[in-house]
Amino acid sequence: MQESQLKAVLFDLDGVVFDTEPQYTVFWGEQCRLYHPEHPGLEQVIKGSTLTQIYDCWFSGPLLKEQPVITERLNAYEQQMDYDYIEGFIAFVDDLRRKGVKTAVVTSSNQPKMECVYRKQPGFKLLFDAILTSEDFELSKPDPDCYLKAAQKLGVEPDECVVFEDSVNGLRSGMAAKMKVVGLLTTNTKDVVEPLSDMQVSDYVGMTFDSMSYSLKFTTGQ
């Protein structure tokens, strides 16, 4: 089978671009202990789920009325969060862009959350050719809709893309889009991530366009 050329890299946001997962664990730990004391450690179970998925599974029925309250708390929490890049990320993206590879963020985060990101990291937008948020697609991960839309926006084919993800739903989304998938071990353990990805990494230190292309069996000619 002929190898494809790598033309675009698509990144999830939390746990992939930013090291925010520990902060979200703190927030959801507080909410879960408040509303679900009968499920200790629930914050670990819901890791990687979208807000809608968390609400549908754990805050529906009698707790439906609490959703706006939790959302308000979450919005306030995100306003004061730190958005620190995963180690090695900036150097990796710089290398990709030098090689002519397009980059995009594909996140279930909404625009109010992204405004926090832009305020805390003014240079963020300059790293990407496109930023897709929850407002840009109808179906949430693990559906491939978001990644297929990103490829279309960048003018590339799915088999010319690599997806970087950390959550189970995100990894499944990338696979369902028929893209190569790199799993970040920032949220789940390797035994969870490995079956859902073509390659696993802890961070971006030492990663380059050439090393990734070789590992994922892309052609390197531009």
Image (cartoon, rainbow, N blue to C red):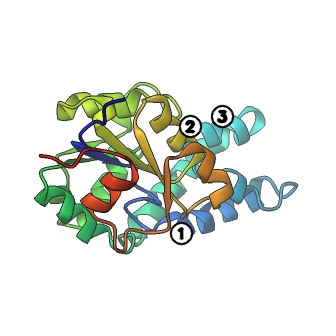
Q: Which residue is pictured at 23% across the width and 61% down the height?
A: 93
Q: Are marks 3 and 2 in contact (CB under 8 Å)?
A: yes
Does 28 appear above or below 148?
below
Residue 177: x, y in percent?
42, 29
Q: CA distance from mark 1 to mark 2?
A: 19 Å
Q: CA distance from mark 3 to mark 2?
A: 6 Å
Q: In this figure, which residue is indicated by the disc labeled 3? A: 56
Of 8 and 61, the residue lying toward us: 8
Of 151 and 219, the residue lying toward us: 219
Q: Which residue is pictured at 31% across the width and 39% down the height?
A: 161
Categorize mark 1 by other alpha carbons within 10 Å: few (<14), some (14-19), many (20+): some
Q: Which residue is pictured at 53% across the width and 49% down the height?
A: 71
Does 107 appear above or below 136?
below
Disc assigned to residue 52: 2
Residue 41 showing in the rendered view: yes
Q: In this figure, which residue is indicated by the disc labeled 1? A: 23
Secondary structure at numbered mark 2: helix
Categorize mark 3 by other alpha carbons within 10 Å: few (<14), some (14-19), many (20+): few
Categorize mark 2 by other alpha carbons within 10 Å: few (<14), some (14-19), many (20+): few
Secondary structure at numbered mark 3: helix
Residue 124: x, y in percent?
22, 61
Residue 50: x, y in percent?
54, 43
Q: Quadrant of the N terminus?
A: top left
